Structure formats: C-alpha cells, structure tokens
Amino acid sequence: MVADSVPPMNRSPIDVAFTLNGLEVAISIDPAERLLDTLRYRLGMTGTKEGCGEGECGACTVHVDGIPVNSCLIPTYQMRGTRVRTVESIDPADVSALLGSGATQCGACTPGVVMTAVWVWEHPELLESHTLRQLMAGNLCRCTGYDGIIAGVGQTLEENGR
Amino acid sequence: MTVFMPTTLTEALEIRCAEDATPMAGGTDLLVHWPEQLERHDRDYLDLWGLDELRRIEWSDDMLELGALTTYWDVVTDARVGAAFPLLVDAARQVGAVQIQARGTWAGNIANGSPAADGVPVLMAYGGTVVVASSEGHREVPLERFYSGYKEMDLTPDELIVAIRIPRRTYRHQRFIKVGLRRAQAIAKVGAAMVSNGSGWRVVASSVAPTIRRCPTIEARISNGQPLGSPDDLLPAIRTDVSPIDDLRSTAAYREQVMSRVLYYAIEEMNHR
C-alpha cells in the first residue's frame, strides 16, 4: 500500500536498493527524500512516526544495520546496501512487558521506544557501560514520565536472564 | 538537487573540485527540519557516507587518527580510545543519544562549525589536528587555529576533512563539562574541556564565543600557582577570553556566571584528588 502523499518527483530520481524487514526493496526515489518519508509514503510503513523532525524526540527511530537511528535525519540514498528494520517487524508478543508496565499512553512515541527497547534487549552487554535510562534517552515521551518505559524494558531484560 | 555518490576518496576530491556540492556525512546537522529548509533542496550534495576508507580508527606510537567518517558511537564503543582519551567518550556520550551518536561524525562536528559543538572542545583540548585533502595533496592544521570566525574555517571549496589526529600525551587531570537545559538530548549553553599535564592547563570553552576556542588567559590564571578564592576570581580571565551572547538557549550573564562556577569547582575537585 502506498499513500497518496508521495512527494512529487521533480528532480532526477536515484535508484536505491536495501533490505526492509528482511525483504529486498529496489526503488527510485527523489534525492531530497528522507528515510522517514520513503518508509511512510512510498513503502506504506506508517508505523514509524514523525515527531520533532530535528533528531531529538526519537519517534522516527528505526534500525539501520542493527543500530537505532532517527529516520528523519537520513537521506534515503544513503540506505543503499543497508538493512533497515521498522516497528512492523516486531512481534507484539515480544513487547508485552511494555503494555503491562504502562509504557505507552497516547502512543506517539511508542514505535520509536519499541525499536530502541528491542536494540537494548538484543545487546544487554551495553548495560556494562550504560544505564537503561541512558540507552533510552533518545526517545522522548510526554505522557508516562518514563518510569513505565524503564520498568517494561527492564522487566524484559530480567525475563531474558539479565 | 544532484547528489554525487563517489566510492573512493580520489573520486570524491575530483567532484569536490569540479562541483559546488555540499559535503554530507551522517546528515544529523544538514537534515534538521529538512521539509521546511527548501533552500537546502536546491543545493547539490557530495555524499561521503560510502567512502569506507574514511571509516577507521588507527593508532601509531605518538598519535590516534580518526578517519573522517568515525562516528561518536564508534568511539563510545572503543575501549582503547576510552582508556587513552576519556574525554572523547565523555563528550560523545553527551551528543544526543545513540540515534545521533550512530550517525554523527567527529569530522562533521568540526565542519559544521557550531560554537556549541561537543566534539570539537575535547579534540582541541587534546591538541588535535585536522587533516584536509584536495586533489593537490594533504595538509594538517591544528584545530585551535582552524576557526577564524562564526562558521568560518580554514577549508577551501576544493578540500575535504579526511582525518583527525590526536597526539598521545600523559595527563594528570582531564575533564569535559557540558551545561544544557537537561542532562540528555540538549545542546550546550556553556561547555568546557580542560586537561592538565601537572605543569600547565589547556582550557577550551564552548557556547561562549563565535567559535569553540582555547582560553589562554584562563589557562595562565589557573596555572600560575595563585590559589582561587572564589569562582568570581575567574571572571576577569573569562571576560578576556570569551564573549558570550544572549540567544535562544541562554543569556550572556548566565553563561559568564556558570562558566566561572563550573571551571572553579572542576579545578577544586581535581586539585584535591
């Protein structure tokens, strides 16, 4: 599904190929297109949200080659040959602790929070050098006061044996 | 908008010389509020992200060399860099969170030329140099002489920053200070990086002048052996070295006041350790 609001392409397009949630994607994009817009409007992956548009809030967090990044600050042409992963790839059962701990209220920040949380769960060794709050600092939430988010991420780490 | 996507540095330098294209690394500065920045859509770009030869951290007997695509996260996760240059890690960990640290580069921080940069002060305190290249060859400029004014730097339109070199020295004290609106995800209102080898200090200030800059008067005042009675004793030296302004993030008065206090208490603490 592609939304109606794909930006009009009035410049020479660039061909970009990458994997999105494990599937090969080959598209022609406007050189001025951000990864966030390619995902949402060209590829229909609207789970990724736009928040501040300046790399502060983290609502647009996706993984590129396994590390969280702000998709609002990445030109899509830089994605050639990379692995991109969005919230659509996440099994809801894997994030149930976040629901139980009150980690989500209005939901605007949640897809980004989930993507950073998944990265922390996949790299528990980061807790040797960082606190959970430091690792989650790039995802702002104006509803929960963060305690529910930290509790949910921490609970899953414990269940995973960390 | 045309994007040039070279795969080798040689090719990139040829494009840099032939075209009026803005170099782009991780995009964390250039893409801020991108949809509204229409004038940026009319420029051409030189995409450096594919130049893997600039993605390296190399040691020699007397220095550490960071390739121009070294990110903050590369440094945060490199234990050897953390052991030898702890301020690099301290500063890198305060540049946004992982999402920015994974994309933002040290060389991009230098080239962006912000007076509020976090990476530049620690590189300058450690005596870092900037290696710039053109199709004609390489040259090396001490970072403390790289800036001549607000966003003005010693880089010609045919040159690219290709590496940063940091001399390996022994320090007795080293400290990075960043005062922002909050502890995470904030830009510096006042910042400082300071190192001492036991006989003298190097002090670099951020967010209090048109550029990141060394502070020779403050260095002389705290290295001269005369004890400081209070933070206010630093104010004359601060007023000589820097010129803070009122802007959207803070006021000149606040910056001056806070600078005197964070420096004073950092020195007190380090001297009594």
Image (cartoon, helix red, strand yellow):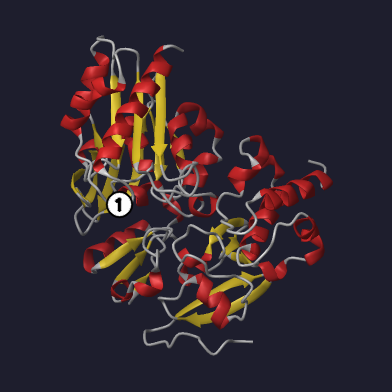
Q: In this orientation, does residue B30 appear?
A: yes
The residue shown at (21%, 53%) is B136
How many neighbours does mark 1 have within 10 angstroms: few (below 14), some (14-19), or many (20 or more)? many
Image spot of residue B237 (x, y percent): 20, 25
The residue that label 1 is drawn on is: B111
Left-right relation of A2 to B92: right
Image spot of residue A90 (x, y percent): 73, 65
The residue shown at (27%, 17%) is B222
Image quadrant of residue B232?
A: top left
Label 1 is found on which chain of the structure? B
Q: What residue type is labelled 1?
A: Ala
Q: Which of B233 and B30 is in front in this view?
A: B233
The secondary structure type at the circle numbered 1 is: helix
**Placement of the N terminus of chain B among the 4 image quadrants:** bottom left
The residue shown at (50%, 86%) is A6
Image spot of residue A144 (x, y percent): 65, 56
Count of labels in the image: 1
Q: Which of B155 and B133 is in front in this view?
A: B155
The residue shown at (40%, 76%) is A32
- In the displayed structure, A107 sits above or below A3; it is above
- In the displayed structure, B233 sits above or below B70; it is above
Q: Which of B5 and B232 is in front in this view?
A: B232
Image spot of residue B230 (x, y percent): 30, 18
Q: In this orientation, does residue B172 appear?
A: no
